[in-house]
Image (spheres, rainbow, N blue to C red):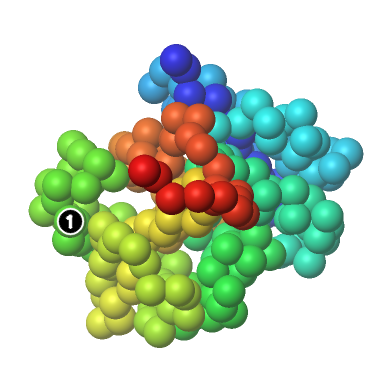
Amino acid sequence: MTIRVTVWNEFQHEKKADHAAAQIYPNGIHSTIADFLNAAGFQAGTATLDEPEHGLTQEVLDNTDVLLWWGHMAHGKVEDAIVDRVQARVLAGMGLIVLHSGHFSKIFKRMMGTSGNLKWREANDKERIWVIEPAHPIAEGLGEYFEIPAEEMYGERFDIATPDELVFVSWFTGGEVFRSGCCWYRGSGKVFYFRPGHETYPTYHQKEVQQVIINGVKWAYTKPAYVSQVVNVPEFMK
Ligand code: ZN
């Protein structure tokens, strides 16, 4: 079965012609990500903030196995009713991959129950992403580490729920470290946070970054599973 993916992007920076993001992602970050996911054999569509219901109607979500989320400057514009809807789908088994500045999105904070706070600096740091769980499916095809030549720095402490599985830890030129590949189980669904992807760097064009996202989609996909309910079990087995 082909995994159905929806790539959600607030799609604000890239619409400003003078913004660096418009040069790097002329059709939007979501299009770049959907393109390499489709090339990898997934069935990937896109949704953006300015579409009706942010492009995330119940029908779209019901037909999404894994949802990717990129947001930065417009987290507050995402309607709470849509966040409720996305959360319900994750608890019912949809995978959710939150990218970069999505750490401050309503849906990520909802899934974590924490602030999502972190340290940051825009100064062209080199990022070295260490694979600390090489047998994890999200690390497939990667070496001991890979590097992104220039990125925004994110540093600890990252205010998240303690990850159920920690796959990557980043080191930056400034000496900071960061839990940059984190997995959680929520209800019948899975959540993966992956750090890189500041909009003024060509990060999502980099091969290793694409590999991690492809691996992440495979990991976050859950075959239709039972969804736990409150059940009064009437009698003991005999
Ligand atoms: Zn950023």
Residue at 41% over, 59% down:
184
- Residue reaching furthest left? 144
Residue identifier under label 1:
133
Q: Relative to residue 200, is residue 63 drawn left or right? A: right
Q: Amino acid at mark 1?
A: Glu
- Asked which quadrant contains residue 154, the reply is bottom left
Q: How many marks?
A: 1
As drawn, is 236 to the left or to the right of 47? Answer: left
> Residue at point 64% right, 44% down?
89
Q: Position of residue 48 (x, y in %)?
A: 74, 41
Q: Position of residue 200 (x, y in %)?
A: 54, 56
Residue placed furthest toward the front:
238
> Compared with residue 204, is residue 144 higher up or lower down, i.e. above or below?
below
Residue 226 in view here? yes
Residue 194 at x, y = what percent? Answer: 41, 56
Residue 114 drawn at (x, y percent) = 56, 78
* Residue drawn at x 67%, y 49% as measured from the top left: 88
Element carrying mark 1: loop
Visible residue check, residue 72: no
74 or 162: nearer the viewer:
162
Q: Residues within 10 Å of mark 1 (few under 14, many from 20)?
A: some
The front one of 20 and 174 is 174
Q: Is residue 179 above or below residue 234?
A: below
Identity of the residue drawn at 31% across and 55% down = 148
Q: Is residue 110 above or below residue 78?
A: below
Question: Image height check: is 21 above or below 125?
Answer: above
Q: Quadrant of the N terminus?
A: top left
Say which quarter of the image contains residue 207: top left
Ligand 1 closer than 8 Å to label 1 CB? no
Q: Quadrant of residue 79?
A: bottom right
Q: Quadrant of the C terminus?
A: top left
Taking the view exactly as shown, the residue that stands out farthest to the top is 1
